Every structure is written in structure tokens, then in C-alpha cells.
Image: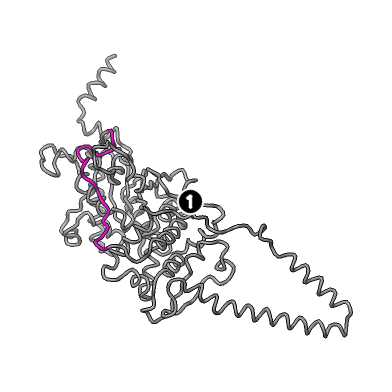
Amino acid sequence: MKLLMTAFLVVLLLPSTVLVTALYHNKTLVFFAGPHKSASTRVEKFFYDYCNGHDRTKHGEYGKKFTFPLRFWRWPRIETDLARNWEPDEPYKIFQHLVKPHTAELDRDILNGITTAWNKSNDGVILGTEWFDQVGDHAQYDAVGAMKKVIDHLGADNVTIVLNYRSPRIEQWASVWKHDDDQSTYDEFLCDKKHHEHRVQLIGTQMNPLNAAKVFLEEKLGKVVLMDMEGISKVEFAKHEDLEYDVAHAIACDVMNGRCNEEGWVRNHKKQKVTVNEGTREFEGLTEEEMILAEKVLTSRDCLYEDVLTQDPNFEILYKSSIWEDCDPDYQKVYEKMEDPAIVFKSLLSQTDCSAFDSEMDVIKIEDILEPGSDYYSTADIVTVMGKGGGRGGGGDFLEAIMFPIILIGAFGYQVFVMLGGRLGERNSGGLKERHAAVMEAEMSAVMSDEEFGDLELDEEDIPQLS
């Protein structure tokens, strides 16, 4: 009994910070990995502003009322002179320099700042940059290496990586165009050949969060949580509130277990919405029908990752909405083609008018790449068209004008050869003609019937409708 009383008194005398630390000893390192054009900047700023400890004496916009809900977490603030020189206006952007080229001195300051935040936190640290989307064979930088550096520096063994998934997918692609080149039209954005390699890189990284998730899991960096932004936007609240749920709040409440109200908003931040930066220009590059096909290309590429991700116990989707709802096993070879971002780019390029660019364009007609029974999957993968003669639908014109006549001429020549060969053979062997006829009959009977080949046309309901 005396021993129990002594232990009770010791606990009472312990500082509250020691008790909290004991309760939350297994801290979590959360990486927010963007990608670009998915409200990433606003998410970073939200946590920079309100996830830096709780000061009871501080008032105002960033005072105790607003920092209390996330008081057990830290978004590291790197406040050295060198860091301020690199990011004077947007200090929450400092972590992009873990991925992009930087100096050893800046690297030291960033890692030391992360360590300080880690030691001060109770639950853990969240940090991020949209440049963590630089993953895979077409990445410009090495995001995985940057993440591993932070993990090893902290000795963290509980890691969660958060990725936003923005849909409809064409909306993110339009936003990429608006922000990557604020001067060009959509056709110019795609047609200028000196930028083709960069456009492929954008499709392979910024536009491919599911591949990033796959690589993070393969590298065993930690758990991966995908935030379905479309599903988040559909969360319903009280009808008198003209509000839509927000991805930053969803991360804070569902991933970090912050102090949130019953509706899921970070407490005291209900009307503070993190919005997507849509840009100032309207997207006028495609007709509505062309946008539907472009959306189908982008969602088809996403289908490639369904099995590998859903079968991994370390992967989770929050607020799942329309992702993967149109995936069809019969279209697997279409999805496999889409794994190459150059194929995706060439199909999108086929929708543009590149007549102003006096050069050859390698395109794949978008209707063909989406149809597993098209000539694309049985003949050459790439159709070459001239800039002045190509453009929308140029691939089909090339097949009709060049390839089909060649095939017909070849078939005619073969028949002439067979006829001449047959007459010559009759002089030497009376049975040759009969054997040839038997072979021809066997070949003709081997051709698949319409019923055996099947109906591989796209049904209208397979094409997602954009709101």
C-alpha cells in the first residue's frame, strides 16, 4: 500500500509535459507530398500558421485560440538567416529545397530545425512540399532520397505520407497548364516541341499521385494515405451553412487526430477554407467532348494502380468517391500502355491543332488508345503526322491515306505470286495445287468470327461525365 501511495505521489509531482511525452512516446512523422495543383500550397501554409505549438499568452489571428487544436504537433519553422534568404516571402516553402538543388549549409539548417520541432512535439511533426511528387522514372529530382534523409536523421520509425488526389483529373491537368506557362494557349502548351520532354515529366509526376503512392510503399517509407478531394468536397454539413469540407481539415482531423468538432472541422477554424488555386484563365483548349476523352485517358492510367495499392495493407484512401469506379479488367492492356507518360502525352497531343508549328508531331489518336480493339494495338504504336497536315484526328488520316493502300498492294502482289507459283508447280507436281487449296481453306477457317472476337466498343456509360 505504501508503495502504491508513493508511486501516486511521484506521478502527481511530475511535470505535465513529462506525462504527455510518456503518453505520446511513439511520435509520428507525417510527410505531406502534394502533388502540385492539388491545394498543396494552401495546405502547407495552414499547418505552418497553426501547427507550431500553443502559446497561452498569444492573441490575435495566430493566437492561443487557433493554435490550441493542433498543440501536440509541430510544423518545423526554419528561422535561420540562410533559410530566410532562400524563402523570404513564403517560409513554409522551405522544404522544397530538400528535393531541389541546395547548399550543404541550408540542408544542415533544415534538418536541425526539423529535429528541434521533433523534440518539442508530443505527437510528432508534419512537414511537406509539393515537390515530394518527384517520384519515378520521369522525375526531375529525387523525392524519395530527400524523405529518407529526414527519416534517418530523426530515427523515425512511424511514418505516414499524405497525398492529395484531385478529380476530375482534367481539372488538375488544366491547372498544371495555367500555372506552368501563363502565356501560351493550351495548343501552344502542348505543341511546342522544345517543351515536350518537360510536359511528359509533368504527366509522369505532378499528374500521377498513384504512382508516387506505389513507389513510397515499394521503398517501405511508411504508410500512405490518399485524400480523395472530390469525396471531401461532398461531405454534407448543416444546410444553413454554405460551406464545403476542406482537405487541410481532413488531414488535421483524420490523419493527425487534432482537436476537431463533431462535423470534422479543426476547432475554431470552421470558416477557414483551404481552396485550390484555379488560376485566372479559363480553360478553353478543348471542347466538352474532347475533355471527356482526355478525362478518360487520365483515369485509365489511374486504373493501372488499383490492384497493387488496394492489396497493400499500408495504403488507405480517405473519403473515397469516384476513383477507380470505371475500371474494367477487359481494358487492362489500355491501362498498361498508359503507364508510359509519353503515351499519355501523345494521346492528349492528338486533340490539339499544331498547324502553326512547322515540324513533325508524333501523336496517338486518343480514340484509338482508349479502344483495345483498335488498329493501334495491332499495328504500329505511333502515327507520325506533319504539323501542317496533322492535328485533331491526324492519326486516322495517315492510316487511311498511306497504310491501307500499302496493305492492299501487298495483298494483290501476294495473290499474283501465288497464281504464278501454282501454274509453275503444276508442271512438276499434280498434287501441289490440291495441297495449296487445302492450306488456303484452313487459313480462311482460322479467322475469328464476329462472335468470337467480341464487341470491344466503348459503351457510352464507360465515359465519365464531367460536372
Q: Is residue 369 visible?
A: yes
Establish if 17 lies above or below 359. above
- Prevailing SS of the magenta stretch: loop
Task: Out of 202 and 18, give the one closest to the viewer.
Answer: 202
Q: Residue 143, position in %: x, y?
A: 35, 58
Residue 6 location, quadrant: top left
**How many neighbours does mark 1 have within 10 angstroms: few (below 14), some (14-19), or many (20 or more)?**
some
Residue 125 appearing in the image: no
- Which residue lies at the image location 68% right of the left edge and 78% below the top edge? 411
Decide if residue 240 is on the left or right side of residue 303.
Answer: left
The residue type indicated by label 1 comes to Asp
Residue 130 in picture, x, y percent from top left: 31, 56
Q: Return the residue at label 1.
A: 326
In this view, 94 is above or below 364: above
Q: Secondary structure at mark 1?
A: loop
Picture residue at 28% right of the left edge, 46% below the top: 248
Residue drawn at 47 percent across, 57 percent down = 300
Does the magenta run of residues contain 26? Answer: no
Q: Is residue 433 left or right of residue 122?
A: right
What x and y, as percent, mark residue 400?
A: 55, 76
Quarter holding the N terminus is: top left
Residue 401 figure quarter: bottom right
Magenta stretch?
262-281
